[in-house]
Image (cartoon, helix red, strand yellow):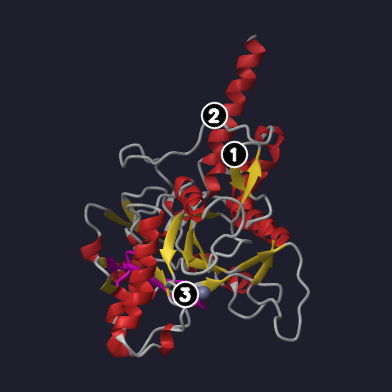
Amino acid sequence: MKKYFRRRLLLLLSLIVVLSGCSNVNEQEKNVADSPTKNMEVGQKPSTIATPLAATEAPKIDLTKVKPNEMGKIMVVMFHNFVESFTPTKYDKGEYTTTFDSFKQLLGDLYDKGYRLISMNDYLNNNINVPAGCIPMVFTFDDGSAGQFNLVKSGDALVANSKSAVGIMEEFNKTHPDFGLKGTFFVNLGGETFNGEGALPERLKYLVDKGFDIGNHTLTHVHLNEIKSADKIEEEIGGNQKKMLELVPGYKFNTFSLPFGQPTKSLQGYVVKGSYQGVDYENQVIVEVGWDPTYSPISKSFNPLSTHRVRASGIKPVDADLAWWLKNLSKADQYVSDGNPNTISVPKSKEDGIDKNKLKDKKVITY
Ligand SMILES: [Zn+2]
C-alpha cells in the first residue's frame, strides 16, 4: 500500500514538472521521455493539468534564464486542405495541402519546440496564459473543408473523424493536454462546409462545444478584392453572419479572414462593420493571407484589423511558410511567456515598444 502511494506521489510530481512549463524546453523533453505519462492509456487524463494562476500564486521565474519576451512576434498559422495522400500535378503543386501524417508530426514538433496554442480572442484581448518559457501560437483554418473537420458515426454518437485535423488534434490532446485544443475555422456558409455526417448546425456546434472558434470568410468565398459596392460586401459578410445565427443561435463572429484580399480603400470600412437584412456585424480581427509572424498584442504596432499570418507548409515547401519560419525565426524574436498573464515581462531594450494604454492592470517587468 505504502509503495502504491509513493508511486502516486512520484507520478504527481513528474506531471507537475512536465505540465508546468517550457522554461527549458530541452530539459522538459527529457522529463517527458522519462515520464510515466508515456505509459498511460490513451484517453486516460493526467490528474493535474496546469491551470491559470493568480498573480499572487504565479511562480517566481529566473528572468535571465527563461528570457521572457512578451513583446516578441507570434505566429498565426493559416491552414487550408488536409488529405490522406497527395500527388502534385502541374496545376496543383500542393502548396496549400497538408497530409494527415505530416500534421500529426507537426503537432509533436511544435510541442517539443515549446509552442502552445492560444485562441484568437486571447490574442486579441492580450490574455495570453501559457507556462513560462513557452511560445504562444494561433491556429486558423480557411474554407471549411472536410479534411479540416468532418463528423463520423461512432455507435449512436457523432465524433470528429480521426482522419481530419480536428480528429488529429483531439487525439494529440489526450497525451499532451497542455498543448491546447484551440483554433479558428473561417467558413463560407453559402457553400459546402465540413462535409460528412450530421447536419450543418451539428457540425458547427461540435466545434463550438469543443472550444474552437468560428470566423467569417464571406457567404460564397467571393473575390472581395473585385467587389465594387458596399451593398455587395454587406451581403457577403452580413449574409454569412445571418446564416450563422440561423444555424447556431446567438453566435456572433468577431473575426474575419479576407478571401482574395481587401476591396478598394473606400470600401474597407464595410469589411469591419456593416449590416445586412437587419443583422449587424463587426469584425475585431481581420486576418490576411500570410507571409510573416504578427505583433504582440501589447506592442504599439499591434493592429488586429491587419493580422498577418504564416501559411502552413504544404506538400511543396515554399519560402516564408511555417517550416521556413520555424527554422529562421530565432527564439529571441518571438513572444516568450513569463508564465503569468498578469505581468508583461520584456528585456529592457523592448520596453519602449509597449503600448501603455493596453496594460490595464498588468505590471511591466524588465530585465
Ligand atoms: Zn479562402
Q: Tell whether circle 3 marks a residue whose Cβ is less than 8 angstroms from ligand 1.
A: no
Left or right of 318? Residue 240 is left
Q: Which residue is mark 2?
A: 47
In the figure, residue 295 lies in which quadrant?
bottom left
Mark 1 crowdedness (10 Å alpha carbons): few <14, some 14-19, many ≥20: few
Query: At label 1, which amino acid type do we have?
Result: Ala
Of badges 1 and 2, nearer the viewer stands: 1
Provide the major secondary structure of the magenta segment: loop
Q: CA distance from mark 1 to mark 3?
A: 30 Å
Q: Secondary structure at mark 1?
A: strand
190 lies left or right of 321: left
Give SS at disc 3.
loop
Left or right: residue 32 versus residue 182 is right
Could you tell me how far apart the alpha carbons at marks 1 and 2 are, in whole angstroms? 27 Å
Q: Which residue is mark 1?
A: 157
Q: Is residue 152 above or below residue 271?
A: above
Q: Earlier in the sequence, mark 1 or mark 3?
A: 1
Q: Are marks 1 and 2 in contact (CB under 8 Å)?
A: no
Magenta stretch in the rendered image: 280-300
Q: Are there few (<14), some (14-19), or many (20+) residues within 10 Å of tag 2?
A: few
In terms of depth relative to the viewer, which is nearer, 8 or 338?
8
The residue that mark 3 highlights is 220
Depth order, front residue of 134/171: 171
Tell me where residue 347 appears, x and y as whole percent: 38, 63
Percent from the top left, x then y, of residue 141? Answer: 53, 65
Q: What's the amino acid at mark 2?
A: Ser
Q: Amino acid at mark 3?
A: Thr
Instruction: Report if residue 32 is visible in the image.
Output: yes
